Amino acid sequence: MSTIALDKEMNPWEAQAARFEFAARKLNLDEGLWKVLSSPNREIIVHFPVAMDNGRVELFTGYRVHHSMARGPGKGGIRYSPDVSLDEVRALASWMTWKCAVVNIPFGGAKGGVICDPRKLSQGELERITRRYTSELIEFLGPEKDVPAPDMNTNEQTMAWIMDTFSMHQRQTVTAVVTGKPIAIGGSAGRRQATGRGVRVVCMEALRQLNMPIAGCRIIVQGFGNVGSNAAQLLMEAGARIIGIAEYDGGLYNANGIDIASLVEYRHRNSSIVGFRGADAVNSADLLLQPCDVLIPAATENVITSRNAGKVQARIVVEGANGPTTAVADEILAEKGVFIVPDILANAGGVTASYFEWVQDRQGYFWKEEVVNERLDEILKASFEEVVRYSQTHGVNNRIAAYMLAIDRVAGVIRQRGFYA
């Protein structure tokens, strides 16, 4: 499948483009739509000054990319990281287009980011960066335009600042401009756990597809943030054994299973999983290559690559993160017979619950958490079935099937709408 040179393997935009190209060719997508969907609709770069706590003024760079708005307003997170780049944001925006289409919710794809290191910034500095970044993008945001959400190193508080800044410019409270907000200002019950819950749902479906029991299932999770910790907790409660947790500063392994509730409490007290006594300390990179039934990469991009894919011993890979497997690694895993639940399906629980939050904000009526979870489970199970059916019908792997399903839906809407001239 991959036409990516090894020197470009780690570029997420190149990986996305290679998968899009393969899926589009399988669909016999016409040339015009191919051109439209292979490039973002809009790329915004902003450079803005922020007064720091020490009195100095620093200049920050932020991005917001709209990939396709054909199916509805843009939807996608905002991340804060020193590694944010336009290619990364561009790739993430396109993945959001396909993700929303796979679960068939009425959003287009968008993504944003600011180049900064949140660990070196005070709460006041983060607030000023967030508000200024929001004000630079103000004309492009809105419930019918573009609806951001939390992502790497951003959270409910970040969304509250964005909502307030936008609302001040509008001279009225506009709760539906962001999702992932605190419940007190229009957030949804169940939203915080939704991505991890979605990972659990599709993991259970994959096990069922392969006739593998959940009881005693050995699972390794890479990343113990919001997604990884919630997925691990929910899967443990379902009967699985979480035998490994890998984090950026160290890993844990216990063949008999790690008590996730205790680990969550330990991490909350110590801001790290390192030193937890309920498991042995191990190297995080090595942990990904240990024998297990399910591997859940739930942290960041490019953790399964051409360098380590041949050593992966999992039967199933469930991608809780965006882009954790490179396009070159895809081919290696396929040759090994690994069953992959791709990111645009596996971690779509977050955007699905964000859709629920947006709907609730707009109607001014909020659902109980049981209702949110029930509807989330229903959508993800149906989407899993559609992707597997597409895979079997077209003789492709699950990732390409998900891309084909998504591209077909977006292209169909564009054909119906036509081209404004």
Image: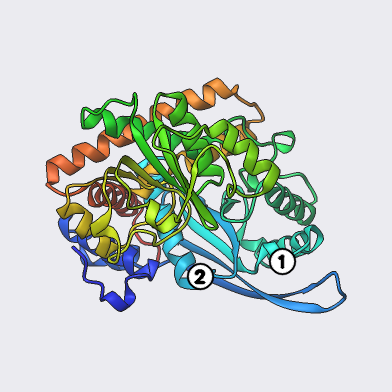
Q: Position of residue 392 (x, y in %)?
A: 14, 40
Label 2 and label 1: CA atoms lie apart by 28 Å
In this picture the colour scheme is rainbow
- Identify the image quadrant of residue 133: bottom right
**Residue 139 vs residue 293: left or right?**
right
* Residue for point 28% across, 34% down: 206
> What residue is at 55 percent from the left and 35 percent from the top?
193
Residue 340 lies, with reference to residue 25, above or below; the image says above
The residue mark sitting in front, 2 or 1, is 1
Q: Is residue 92 left or right of residue 61?
A: left
Q: Amino acid at mark 1?
A: Lys
Q: Which residue is mark 2?
A: 43
Residue 120: which numbered mark, if any? 1
Secondary element type, mark 1? helix
Residue 84's image quarter? Answer: bottom right
The kind of residue on which mark 2 rests is Glu
User: Measured from the top left, where is residue 386 in percent x and y?
Assistant: 26, 36
Q: Secondary structure at mark 2?
A: strand
* Label ID, residue 134: none
Q: Quadrant of the C terminus?
A: bottom left
Does residue 357 appear left or right of residue 58 in this picture? left
Mark 2 and mark 1 lie on one chain; the one further toward the N terminus is 2
